[in-house]
Amino acid sequence: MTKAPTILQVIPWLDSGGVERGTVDIAAAITRAGGTALVAAEPGRLVGELEAVGGKLLPLKGRSKNPLAILLSNARTIERMIREQGVDLVHARSRAPAWSAMIAAHRAGVPFVTTYHGAYSQKGRLKAFYNSVMAKGDIVIANSHYTARLVRERNPDAENRIVTIHRGVDMEQFDINTVAPERVEALRQQWGVDDRPVLILPSRLTRWKGQSFIIPVMGALKKAIGPAFQLLLIGDEQGRESYVAELDRLIAEHDVADCVSRVGHCKDMPAAYALATMVIVPSQDAETFGRSAAESLAMGKPTLVGDLGAQPEVVAAPPDVPEGQWIAKVIRHNDAEGWQQAIADTLAMSEEQKKAVAPFARGLIEACFSLRSMGQQTLAVYDQLLGCDLSGH
């Protein structure tokens, strides 16, 4: 094609989270390459960032407790967007709007791409059918090798259409050397952090992310070594009031109010990582990538993850790190004693050891999981379907 393409990404809500962040990141890559980046979604907190990178939001009713009721309506809306905006390709990143986007793309005669972000529960035939839309793209992007295997198992017919593109970390933003001390101090004051080592668990508050699992571990750790640490649960409640109440009960029951705090959403995650002594990601269900772990290693921070999903492939030690010196560790996800021991061992690591290995950690993320790599590979997918050269810019 001769003109720079117009790409429409479709998600439910442009607010917060990995899918939403990835949408903005790809919009930035599209506009840097000279294309036009559109996003169909309900407006949220990331609209300003989308506009700052040159993208444009097209309002769409993306969230509904009855997605079937708006599926055809949204299909008509997206088809109108395609025709009015001269869209050349539609890229869907979430199941409910993906059905609408697929119908619209087929009606308008433009390529349809999906990114398979989640493990998605497959309980029952109806749920499996609902999920199957994410494997119906002309090209299906899997965000990890784990996800690619999952898609193949569930959708054998998609085998030749699957491409693995790992999620990307912004290496400029997540750089320990560019985080001003004032930013770190601002968070320290906001969260009431003292001089004890700081553990952070950066995930939205939902059971499978492991907050309710790790609080009793903190209670056992406190009994073993005293209150010589502080854990910050960083993340949105997203309306899960009963789960938040459960977390507060667990904090009280395990006598860790002086060690564990809920601090809510954080707008400056690089500063949060800079503040941290270590990062823990005790997910109790499979992560299809592991963004927090990748960001943590980019910042050179010791990182502990569970053994489910893609997180082990994100934190695997590079070959040039001496055995036993790597700052990331994989723990069996539901092994409370294992988590307690791993945290205690990491707290005991010397600063010299951490500093020696930190450059290797950053090099790993730069080579395998950078934003630049993700953007170039995604643009190459668009090029393949459109016959353009976005990835060459």
Image (cartoon, rainbow, N blue to C red):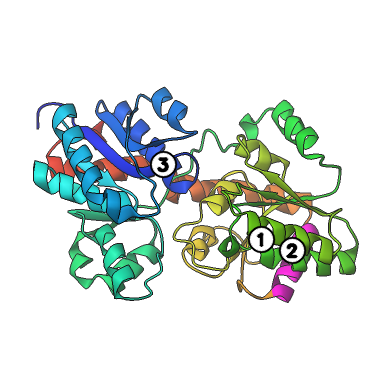
Residue 325 visible in the snapshot: no
The residue singled out by tag 3 in the image is 13
Q: Are marks 2 and 1 in contact (CB under 8 Å)?
A: yes
Secondary structure category for the residue under label 1 = helix
Residue 182 visible in the snapshot: yes
- Nearer to us of marks 3 and 2 is 3
The residue singled out by tag 1 in the image is 211
- Mark 3 vs 2, N-terminal side: 3
Could you tell me the amino acid type at mark 1?
Gln
Main SS class of the magenta portion in the image: helix
The residue singled out by tag 2 in the image is 215
Question: In the image, is 48 to the left or to the right of 212?
Answer: left
Secondary structure category for the residue under label 3 = strand
Could you tell me the amino acid type at mark 3?
Trp
- Mark 1 vs 3, N-terminal side: 3
Q: Nearer the viewer, residue 391 or 378?
A: 378
